[in-house]
Amino acid sequence: MTEVILALDVGTRDAAVSIAEKTGPYLDAIKIGYPLVLAAGLTIADELSAGGLPLIADFKVADIPNTSRLIAEEVFSHGFSGIICHGFVGRDSVLACVDTAHDHGGECYVVTEMSHPGAVDFFHGGIAERIAALVCETGADGIIAPATRPERTQMLRTLIGTRKILSPGVGAQGGDPSAIAGIVDGIIVGRAIYESADPAGAAQQYAQFRSLRGTNPHLPYPLRE
Ligand code: O7M
C-alpha cells in the first residue's frame, strides 16, 4: 500500500486538531514540522500522537552529531514515531539520528533530493546518489525523494532497493500522484488537503492511490506486500 501522509503545516493548534480529526480515517501518518511546532509548541505532538496515527517529525535535522542526537531525543520523548534528517551533513550526523530513532523503536528518513525547482542547484550532479549510498550504509529506514521528478525518484529507487521512499510535492507543487505512487511507499500531501474546502474529501481522493504501490513495471524490486 502506498501510504498517504498529511503534511500538517497549519498555523494553529485548533486548525491542526480539527483537520487531523476530519482527515484521519483516510491517512496513514501525519508529518509536522517547524510551521506548526513553532506556532503551537511541541506539545501539539503529544496531542496529535494520542489520535493513534504515526507522527513524523520533519525538522530536517542538519547539525553536528551531538546536537542532532539531542534533537532526536527530544523528538522521541513527544510521541513521534519517525524523524527526518538531511543527508548532506554526512555519515556521523545521519547516524546520530538513525541510532537515536532505532534506540526508541522509531524510524529515520533522510532527505535525498528535494521537490522544489531550486533543488536541482545542489542535489543534481551526484549529490543525491551519494546521499542514497549513505542511507544504505547508515541503516536509515528510507529517503525523502521528489514527486515532482518521478524519473529521479525512480533512479533513487534503484540505489536504495526496498528501503522506504516518502515523496512530497504531490498536489500544490504539481506532482501527479498517479505518476509517483507506483514507485514509492508514501506520498506526502499538504496544501491540497488542508487548504481544501473539504479536507476529508481531498484526503479520501488521495487514499485511492494507496493501491498503486509497486505497480510501476520498471521497478527493480517487487514492492507489493
Ligand atoms: O503539499 P505541500 O506542498 O503543501 O507540502 C509539502 C510538504 O512536504 C511540506 O511540509 C514540505 O516542507 C515537505 N517537503 C517538500 O515539499 N519537499 C521536499 O523536498 C521535502 C519535504 C519534506 O517533507 O521533507 C522531509
Image (spheres, helix red, strand yellow):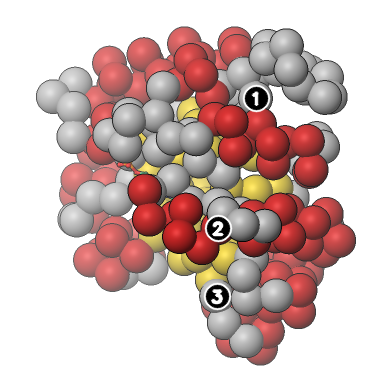
Judging depth in this view, the residue of 195 and 21 nearest the camera is 195
Q: CA distance from mark 3 to mark 2?
A: 15 Å
Residue on which disc 2 sits? 123
The amino acid type found where label 1 is placed reads Ile
Q: Position of residue 54 (x, y in %)?
A: 55, 43
Q: Is residue 212 left or right of residue 122?
A: right
Quarter of image, res 126: bottom right
Does dot 2 land on a helix, a strand or a loop? helix
Task: Point out which mark residue 183 bears.
Answer: 1
Lower sequence index among marks 2 and 1: 2
Q: Earlier in the sequence, mark 1 or mark 3?
A: 3
Q: Nearer the viewer, mark 3 or mark 2?
A: 2
Indicate which label's residue lies in the foreground, 2 or 1. 2
Picture coordinates of residue 75 (x, y %)?
Answer: 54, 68
Q: Is residue 107 above or below residue 182?
A: below
Picture quarter with the N terminus: top right
Relative to 46, is 85 on the left or the right? right
The C terminus sits in image quarter: top right
Check disc 3 and report the residue beneath it: 62
Q: Amino acid at mark 3?
A: Ala
Residue 130, how many percent across, how many down? 73, 60
Report which quarter residue 112 is drawn in: bottom right
Q: Residues within 10 Å of mark 1 (few under 14, many from 20)?
A: many
Mark carried by residue 215: none
Instruction: Please state the horizontal and vertical placement of residue 224, each as a whole percent of the image.
Output: 76, 17
Side (left or right) of 170 relative to 191? right
> Looking at the image, which residue is at 51% across and 19% down?
179
* Residue at the image point whose x is 54% and y is 30% from the top: 150
